[in-house]
Image (cartoon, helix red, strand yellow):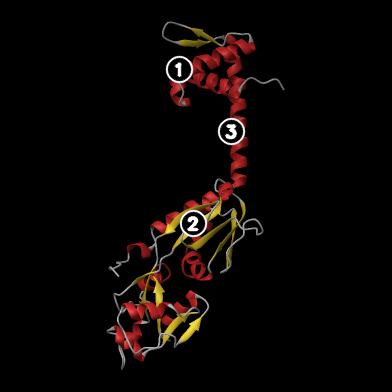
Amino acid sequence: MKLPPLNALRAFEAAARHLSFSRAADELSVTPAAVSHQIKGLEDWLAVPLFRRLNRAVMLTDEGQSYLVGIREGLEAIGDATEKILLQGTSGSLTVSTLPSFAARWLLPRLSSFQQRHPDINVRISATDIITDFHRESVDAVIRYGSGNYPDLHSELLLQEDHLFPVCSPVLLEGPHPLTRPSDLAHHTLLHDDLRVDWETWLAAADVKGIDSKKGLSFNDSSMVLSAAMAGQGVALGRSTLAAEDLKAGRLVKPFDIELKAGSAYYFVCPKEFINRPQIMAFRDWLFEEAENDPGRFMYVPES
């Protein structure tokens, strides 16, 4: 097919619709001179005049009137075909990897709103502690807990640095040994992540002595630690991001004000060449909207 330049056709259609080179230029975000140049080039290409230039106006010639009908139909067809392709780009499957604790406590309770907004995108959540290798795994994006320094990847801060503080069931604020001051922890079971190092650091910051920071129940996932705390099995060190919803709902309480900075935050990460994919952008935009409304962002965090 022998076709003239698309930009010239767009300039012609806009100028014909407005009967003004200036208004067409405003619509196309170019100068009137650029519109005039495009139309003059199109007239030369066709070897027929499309406009009659008057003193302060332009009028379509008979050839221009006839040409406009076909060009308008053609541009509309191009627009329709493009929209269909873009809509297809926002359907299909999307695999997101993140920590099991973040998936259970933060992501999954919110995921239904994404499905309502984008019913054509089938989301698969891969909950794992293993760092994703985008070259070897079929993963589109990850939510990582760390420093944000991920070379050669697109990385955006999603949720601010976590804080650690004791959390427990409200029932532990009553009974024979209510939690009123940090030393009362001697009468309660400490709940740990597998590493068992956070309690030692927190007890030192609270100047509590005589408590074995290694004793207690240990779990390999932060979500299970919080579940055990809600069940009244002991006192956990909760992270502000993961514990926020349970604190807001009253399933957990925060008996003391002493907090530690965890030194890490949650980041949205994907390969740089993936970020403009419609499915990933749709998920990313939704994710950041949810983060803006995260109750953990509004919790009072005293100086530690």
Give the camera-side residue of 274 and 174: 274
Residue 20 seen in the figure? no
* Left-right relation of 33 to 211: right
Looking at marks 1 and 3 on the same chain, the residue that comes earlier in the sequence is marked by: 1
Q: Position of residue 278 (x, y in %)?
A: 56, 47
Report if the CB atoms under discs 2 and 1 are less than 8 Å apart: no
Res 73 quadrant in image = top right
Q: How far apart in space, not on screen, are marks 2 and 1 (Cα)?
A: 47 Å
Res 261 quadrant in image = bottom left
For the residue labelled by badge 2, is the local secondary structure a helix, a strand or a loop? loop
Q: Which residue is mark 2?
A: 149
Q: Amino acid at mark 3?
A: Gly
Looking at marks 2 and 1 on the same chain, the residue that comes earlier in the sequence is marked by: 1
Report if the CB atoms under discs 2 and 3 are less than 8 Å apart: no
Q: How far apart in space, not on screen, are marks 1 and 3 (Cα)?
A: 24 Å
Q: Which residue is mark 1?
A: 32
Give the camera-side residue of 55 and 144: 144
Q: Residue at x 49, y 83 (%)?
A: 218
Single out the mark in the foreground, 2 or 1.
2
* Left-right relation of 272 to 294: right
Q: Residue at x 60, y 36 (%)?
A: 82
Q: Amino acid at mark 1?
A: Pro
Instruction: Bin the neighbour count of mark 1 within 10 Å (Cα to Cα): few under 14, some 14-19, many 20 and up.
Output: some
Looking at marks 2 and 3 on the same chain, the residue that comes earlier in the sequence is marked by: 3
Q: Amino acid at mark 2?
A: Asn
Q: Position of residue 67 (x, y in %)?
A: 61, 16
Q: Which residue is mark 3?
A: 79
Q: Position of residue 245 (x, y in %)?
A: 40, 69
Single out the mark in the foreground, 2 or 3.
2
Q: Could you tell me which quadrant the C terminus lies in?
A: bottom left
For the residue labelled by badge 1, is the local secondary structure a helix, a strand or a loop? helix
